[in-house]
Amino acid sequence: VSKIFSAGLDITEMSGKSNEHYAAFWRAVQEMWLKLYGSNMVTIAAINGSSPAGGCLMALCCDYRIMADNPKFAIGLNETQLGIVAPFWFKDTMINTIGNRATELSLQLGQMYPAPEALKFGLVDKLVPEDKVQSAAAAAMSQWLSVPDHARQLTKSMMRKPAIDRLVKQREADINNFVSFISKDSIQKSLQIYMDRLKQKK
Ligand SMILES: CCCCCCCCC/C=C/C(=O)SCCNC(=O)CCNC(=O)[C@H](O)C(C)(C)COP(=O)(O)OP(=O)(O)OC[C@H]1O[C@@H](n2cnc3c(N)ncnc32)[C@H](O)[C@@H]1OP(=O)(O)O
């Protein structure tokens, strides 16, 4: 889809469904994060459009982020704006990228940052013209792949293992927490209002 890197998690998967559905959905989201954040491969995000919430998380899982230089494209963990809460492992992923204070500001306010602003505090690493995103990502990939792989892999694992271990240890509790949170009437209402607002925007 043009103008969108990822719209984040599918909100329709989190509304009006059974608890079994929510649990299976959340396990799959955890799985995606564990695989991508824990990958020993080099991962470069080529962010060619807006990237809210789950989209931002996916980008943050990568080793390096290149974004199209267009202030109309924004990136951030905007969960609070939907009346929901970024889970601790979303928060950890952001802290590991931009630090504690910038993460707290960003999460409490549910801020989406236009690309030039995101660059300023390291939420993305580089901006390039829209038609150069793929080639810049390929060039970055070559640079990362030129480092001896065993050393790079061990270093990546050393940096990320504490956050990964934390979710692995609490996986079932995190699923239960998600299900009891998302199935609350008040949360379902917030999500409904947010979806209605998205549709009215047209
Ligand atoms: C305690 C802890 C416990 C745990 C607590 C729970 C933790 C949950 C963590 C959640 C993580 C998330 O990712 S939550 C999801 C966050 N995502 C968002 O906020 C994205 C909202 N969307 C947008 O901002 C925009 O749509 C954007 C992506 C920039 C594209 O804008 P455009 O103008 O190009 O397109 P639109 O017209 O808006 O959208 C096209 C259609 O797609 C729909 N759509 C857009 N985003 C959608 C989405 N994420 N899910 C479903 N549908 C979506 C719109 O309603 C439209 O539907 P039609 O009108 O029918 O065509």
Image (cartoon, helix red, strand yellow):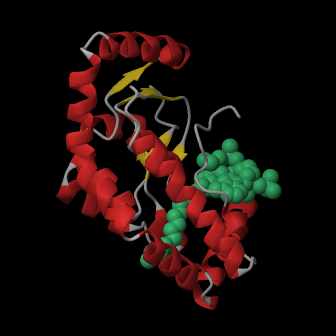
Residue at x-position 38% and y-position 43%: 38
Split into quadrants, the picture shows ligand 1 in the one at: bottom right
Q: Nearer the viewer, residue 12 or 114?
A: 12
Report the number of numbered marks. Answer: 0
Tell whether 96 sits left or right of 68: left
| Quadrant of the rendering where the C terminus is positioned | bottom right
Residue 171 in the image: state x and y as whole percent: 44, 68
Residue 112 in the image: state x and y as whole percent: 44, 52
| Quadrant of the rendering where the N terminus is positioned | top right
Compared with residue 121, is residue 139 higher up or lower down, i.e. above or below? above
Compared with residue 60, is residue 191 higher up or lower down, i.e. above or below? below
Residue at x-position 31% and y-position 17%: 144
Residue 161 in the image: state x and y as whole percent: 26, 49
Residue located farthest toward the bottom when viewing the structure as drawn = 185
Compared with residue 156, is residue 147 higher up or lower down, i.e. above or below? above
Residue 196 in the image: state x and y as whole percent: 72, 69
Q: Nearer the viewer, residue 36 or 114?
A: 36
Q: Nearer the viewer, residue 34 or 106?
A: 34
Compared with residue 192, is residue 73 higher up or lower down, i.e. above or below? above
Residue at x-position 55% and y-position 29%: 48
Q: Confirm whether residue 25 shows in the render.
A: yes
Q: Confirm whether residue 194 shows in the render.
A: no
Tell whether 71 sits left or right of 194: left
Tell whether 91 sits left or right of 6: left
